[in-house]
Amino acid sequence: MNIDMARGIKATPGTNDSGLRRDWTTAEASAFFTMPFADLIHRAQTVHRRHFDANEVQMSTLLSIKTGGCPEDCGYCSQSAHFDTGLKATKLMAVEAVANAAAEAKAGGAQRFCMGAAWRELKDRDVDALCEMVSAVKAQGLETCMTLGMLTKGQAERLAGAGLDFYNHNIDTGPEYYATVVTTRTMQDRLETLAHVRDAGMAVCCGGIVGMGEARDDRVGMLVTLANLPKHPESVPINALMPIKGTPLGDSNPIEGLEFVRTIAAARIMMPESVVRLSAGREHMSEELQALCFLAGANSIFIGAKLLTTKNPAKEKDDALWSKLGIRPMEA
Ligand code: SAM
Ligand code: DTB
Ligand code: SF4
């Protein structure tokens, strides 16, 4: 415990600066999936309330700034050129169009604007335009996040220099299941980009997907990998697979609701100061399941009717839920 913790002073949420990181073992993480549910939720709530206001939720909006035609073969993705998903590929959007979408997101209540591109890696020729997008979005008082595939050290420095706040790059699943889901890159490739993002001084957004036919041990492996990174990601998205027709994982059985909640609770306990995002999949979840996820320590979501290429709940439906649960937006 550092001196501020000992004095009872809370660390600033999302800064991960109070020295709470420690190495987790597989056995410790597995226990969160078998212990009595009420004990798990109590522990997750206790950790959550020590570091955050439990009624506040961070709200981000996503925009696909370059859709489809991706050379990677991620088995879950609508945007891979390897699968026939019926998605129309587009070029990189113009800066002005991105700025307009950001203004709309802000008006809709977002604190952060996340821009995603269906690339294996960023090309140097696109960096200037992306830096302009970062400036245009920040000028509207929004936090910025981008997810553009692999980055070199120099590219990460350029984006950080332009003021990019977060970089999203997911490890997606446990190390042993990784090659079943993606063959065109390795988890090590992901870890290298994450190190460049950290070294450049940006905040890290890194999580994964559940419901891809993985075993519980793979979910445990994913959480242990995330929690044992040199520094915890400031943002940890836990996505429930949005099944896409035409992809190898398009017919996957949905993850059981309580197993999803346990995954969220384990992430909350293992990464106490990280913002844990109940990410893709809310469209298929009941209000009760979402409420359980918030009880388990989720404190971030995507708002807006679309994720990148798939559906997210409509604003009216979400607003009604926030009102029923007494949820307030977290200040940026
Ligand atoms: N191409 C970049 C990359 O893969 O890092 C950025 C965009 S990619 C769509 C961002 C993340 O979205 C993936 O890492 C994955 O975790 C998530 N994702 C993609 N398709 C999904 C799906 N069908 N269901 C849930 N999450 C998905
Ligand atoms: C993340 O973990 N989830 C978001 C964001 N990071 C880029 C993407 C979800 C995509 C869901 C499928 C789709 O809409 O294409
Ligand atoms: Fe490409 Fe990203 Fe989709 Fe993989 S997840 S196919 S890298 S857009």
Image: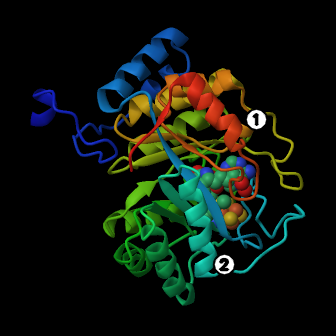
Label located before the other in sequence (1 or 2):
2
Label 2 CA crowd tier, 10 Å (few <14, some 14–19, many 20+): some
Q: For the point 52% across and 46% down, which residue is it?
A: 59
Q: For the point 84% across and 71% down, which residue is it?
A: 88
User: Residue 104 location, x and y as percent?
Assistant: 60, 61
User: Residue 162 location, x and y as percent?
Assistant: 39, 77
Q: Amino acid at mark 2?
A: Met
Q: Secondary structure at mark 2?
A: loop
Q: Amino acid at mark 1?
A: His
Residue 284, which numbered label?
1
User: Residue 180 location, x and y as percent?
Assistant: 71, 51
- Residue extending furthest bottom? 125
- Asked if the beta carbon under badge 1 is closer than 8 A to the nearest atom of ligand 1, the reply is no
Label 1 CA crowd tier, 10 Å (few <14, some 14–19, many 20+): some
Q: For the point 52% across and 65% down, which residue is it?
A: 146
Q: Which residue is mark 2?
A: 93
Relative horizontal placement of residue 98, taking residue 195 as reference (left or right): right
Q: For the point 80% across and 70% down, which residue is it?
A: 81
Relative horizontal placement of residue 92, taking residue 127 as reference (left or right): right
